[in-house]
Structure formats: structure tokens, C-alpha cells
Amino acid sequence: MKSLSKSLIAAVVLAVLAVGGYLGWSALEQKPDAPNASFSLLDGKTVDLSAYRGKVVLVNFWATSCPTCVGEMPELVKTYDQLNPKGFDLVAVAMSYDNPEFVRNFVQQRQLPFTVAFDASGQTAKSFKDVRLTPTSFLIDKSGRIVKQYVGTPNFAELHHIIDKLLARQA
């Protein structure tokens, strides 16, 4: 009887570990706080990331010289247009090595509807885990926690699903 109890306990423990591993223990994971970053906008104004508290925001690091970044911009515009009315925002941060005039021209030609910043000093990229590869994006929840990091183009269907879930939650 005793060995049956031990076997049952072992089976339960294994089942819990398997389910926990499958789910990634996401409910138990503590998401890191987003950095206390400031964005220098193309018009010279500065906006702090804290101004987006209460919204779900995607911070996207990009460069005009990055073909993948340029390629994902139409999808970022669609994501913004579709989800902004629900409380989603997007900040596209051009890297310090980009040419500010190229960034301005890109934004104007593509009529980007979201906030675009230029990280002239590289401090914003440093504050976000020292971003060096583009595109790199950080999805931040209403409470200011980083929910997910994407290096490269995100799976937009998955991204939309996560954003919808985050928008449905209270801050």
C-alpha cells in the first residue's frame, strides 16, 4: 500500500511539472519592469515611457538601413491602426547610427501614424537591455512591465492575440 502511495504522489508531481512546463508557469512568472526611458521625438520634444502607463505599448527599435525593419513597417502600421482605438500605442525608435534626415523622410513618405523617436545618444537602446540588433521590439503591459521581447519580425497573428489579451486586463 505504501509503494502505491509513493507511486501516486510521484505521478501527481510529474503531471504537475509537465503541465507547468507546458504552460511555462506564466502565471507565476514575474515580468520585468520596463526601463525608465525617455524618447526624443523628431520634432525635438521628449516623452517618457511612463506617459504610456495604462496603455499596452510596443517599443520597436529599427533603422532605415535595415531591410527587415522597413519590411515590417506596413504590418506595424496595420497593428497600430487596428488596435490603437482599444488602448494600444506604438513607439518606433530609430537607432543612433541612423541618419536623422533619412528617418524624417521615411516617416513622412510612409505617413507613419504612431510616435517616432530618434535615439541620437543611444541611451534609449542601452536602457532596453542594450539593444543592438534591429528590429527588436518590447511589448509592455498597462502596468509598465515587459511582457515579451521580439528580435526580428514578430509573428503578427500571435502579437495581436497577446495585445488583445493585455488590453482586456485591468491595469
Image (tube, helix red, strand yellow):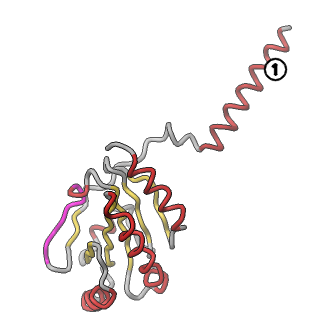
Of residues 33 and 121, the one drawn nearer to the viewer in this rendering? 33
Residue 67: x %, y % from top left = 47, 86
In the image, residue 61 lies in the stretch drawn in magenta: no
Residue 133: x %, y % from top left = 45, 74
Residue for point 48% across, 55% down: 162
Residue for point 59% across, 44% down: 24
Residue for point 31% across, 91% down: 109
Classify 166 as above or below 157.
Answer: above
Q: Of helix, strand and loop, which one carries label 1?
A: helix
Identity, as a three-letter code, of the amino acid under mark 1: Ser
Classify 67 as above or below 132.
Answer: below
Of residues 131 and 42, the one drawn nearer to the viewer in this rendering? 42
Of residues 168 and 49, the one drawn nearer to the viewer in this rendering? 168
Residue 63: x %, y % from top left = 38, 82
Residue that label 1 marks: 7
On the picture, is 91 further left or further right than 65? left
Residue 23, image quadrant: top right
Residue 124: x %, y % from top left = 28, 67
What is the number of callouts on the image? 1
Residue for point 41% across, 50% down: 166
Quadrant, the C terminus? top left
Residue range (magenta) = 44-50
In the image, residue 49 lies in the stretch drawn in magenta: yes
How packed is label 1: few (under 14 Cα within 10 Å), some, or many (20 or more)? few
Residue 136, image quadrant: bottom left
Quadrant, the N terminus? top right
